[in-house]
Image (spheres, rainbow, N blue to C red):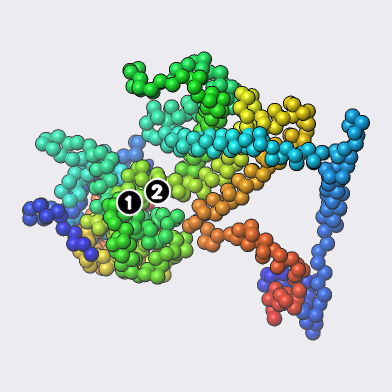
Amino acid sequence: MIAGPGAGPPGGRRDGGEDAGSLKIVPVRHPGRWVASAVILVLLAMLVDTLVFSHLTRGGVREGRFQWGVVGSYLFDPSVLRGIVVTLELTVIAMGVGIVLGVLLAVMRLSASRLLSGTAWLYIWFFRGTPVLVQIIFWYEGISYLYPHLSFGVPFGPSFVTVSANSLDTAFVAGVLGLSFNEGAYMAEIVRAGIISVDEGQTEAAQSIGMSRAATLRRIVLPQAMRVIIPPTGNETISMLKTTSLVYAIALTDLFTATQNISNRNYEVVPLLMVASLWYLFFTSLMTVGQYYIERYYARGSTRSLPATPFQRLRQGLFRIRPQTPSPLTDPPLARPHA
Amino acid sequence: MPEPTGPPERGVREAELPMVDARQVHKSYGRLEVLKGIDLTVGRGAVLCLIGPSGSGKSTFLRCINHLEKIDGGELFVDGDLVGYRQSGNRLHELKDREVCSKRAEIGMVFQRFNLFPHMSALDNVLAGPVWVKKAPGGPSKERARELLARVGLADKVDNYPNQLSGGQQQRVAIARALAMEPKLMLFDEPTSALDPELVGDVLDVMRDLAGTGMTMIVVTHEMGFAREVGDTVVFMDAGVVVEQGDPRRVLTEPEHERTRSFLAKVL
Ligand SMILES: Nc1ncnc2c1ncn2[C@@H]1O[C@H](COP(=O)(O)OP(=O)(O)OP(=O)(O)O)[C@@H](O)[C@H]1O
Ligand SMILES: [Mg+2]
């Protein structure tokens, strides 16, 4: 504010004789900010009131509007916890397969071979162009309808292992296939954007010391591409956690289906939706924190000094709260540039 | 410093072969002909300085030597072997990717914009070649990498990341990275053009020392002082052809060709 050379003390010119240090500083006022804060405080109060204190009469019984007691009693229900495990399994497997597929497809798309890049393009075109829900149901119905016997062996030749589709947990497999094939298409574009963001000079330098193409990709290009790849991948993971709830359509008991099964029995629809929401929120919050630290790790070498972690910032923030208005006594270099 | 000698089984006659021998080398990008028949040789232990206006094809020629680009015509030999091919009988087989890599590993290259690996410390940059390409054991390689960094005057910057180093320091790490592969030939593509004037000297000093150890070097440069002092030959290229070459003192002071003269008038 007042750091520029020749800037006088706040409030105007330096009149003869008067020492800037003895002048009183009048901070700028922000009336609009005050009004907005007041409105928000009122809205927050209403929210707390409706969430916590407000009651109402349903079917002759007076009870809390949001029935937190009911929410609490189902939050750790064994079937809900089992559903959480399924949700997390689906998320981890689908993201894992999706990332591997994505890297593979991205490399294929950047390949000089028309066949490889064309195949990747076709894959992405197909799986991005159809809804995930349709894909999940398609695999669920399709596996036993199209391929009642899955066999592994020589293409068009003898097969070594044959599995009956009925022996698989069809719903889980269908969920994983639908989610991960779709994810692969999105991850391919994310990884490709990351790879082309790395300077070509890096590839040349790696090749000039004799590194192979594969080693260059793995050791030099991908680690640098990570900075571009990680943030959208974090978003994809968070999105995946929530998208897994689509397996409700094929009756796979994930977190959401588990809560729905309970409310189908006891008709506590809203409290159980809240149980599901609270758990989704909990895990997405965890992921946000994890993403932050992974991003920090891959920022090595791109920023001279790493930014503070939220905890470090919190600690600094606590100490910075008091001297908000610059005091002429504690900040002499700012307040008295000519001194 | 490794003496740039050929493999032991090679005869004396082969040791007298030039390190680089270009005969009518042609290279085009689409319809743009960038190299229009380059003829030049670089003897073992010699320093050749390549000068010429922007766009004359100097970088392209260097990139052809370590097969970052494929030539379209002519012949290019490095250490007696045709670049990009293997001769058996009277047939030429195009090299497999793996063979191209092992040829490149014998040639060091230093770039105008350093191209250090930004996600790795100076030491790891120097270690990349020995450990990942030569699969050399970590311990001794680390020792040698430290020695190389000390040799280019960066003993105290071993653990710094590239963006914590000045341009001149980065370029010296890049030279150490190339030397770590014990190359028989070093290619420099305008190694000081991206540097602040006061940092140029440190890099040139390292290169001068390297030339003193008998390393064969091709240096694309605009530093005429360096060319005159260190170069055994100066080659002036323009529009994809070699216009004039010879002893630096002669070419730089009494050029025969008008084009050389007008170029030198501009840069000196
Ligand atoms: N990959 C490429 N595709 C198409 N044209 C290229 C490519 N690389 C170089 N060229 C062209 O080839 C010509 C020679 O380029 P080159 O980089 O070899 O010149 P140079 O002598 O090194 O110039 P400078 O001193 O500016 O580095 C230029 O006209 C350039 O535009
Ligand atoms: Mg160039």
Name of the residue lying farthest toward the bottom: A17
* SS for dot 2: helix
Decide: is A256 above or below B50.
Answer: above
Q: In the rendered image, is residue A88 in sight? A: yes
- Mark 2–mark 1 Cα distance, whole angstroms, equals 9 Å
Q: Quadrant of the C terminus of chain B?
A: bottom left
Q: Tell me where residue A230 sits by quadrant.
A: top right
* SS for dot 1: helix
Residue shown at 15% from the left, 48% from the top: B80
Decide: is A321 above or below B72.
Answer: below
Q: Tell me where residue A312 sits by quadrant.
A: bottom right
The answer to which of B167 and B262 lies nearer the viewer is B167
Task: Left or right? Give the position of A68 relative to A104.
Answer: right
Image location (x, y in percent) of residue B52: 31, 54
Report whether mark 2 lies on the same chain as mark 1.
Answer: no
Task: Left or right? Give the position of A299 relative to B254.
Answer: right
The answer to which of B236 and A64 lies nearer the viewer is A64
Image location (x, y in percent) of residue B29: 34, 39
How packed is label 2: few (under 14 Cα within 10 Å), some, or many (20 or more)? some
Label 2 with label 1: CB-CB less than 8 Å: yes
Decide: is B77 above or below B136.
Answer: above
Residue shown at 49% from the left, 40% from the top: A191
- The residue beneath circle 2 is A219
- The residue beneath circle 1 is B132
Q: Given the image, on which type of amino acid does mark 1 rest?
A: Trp
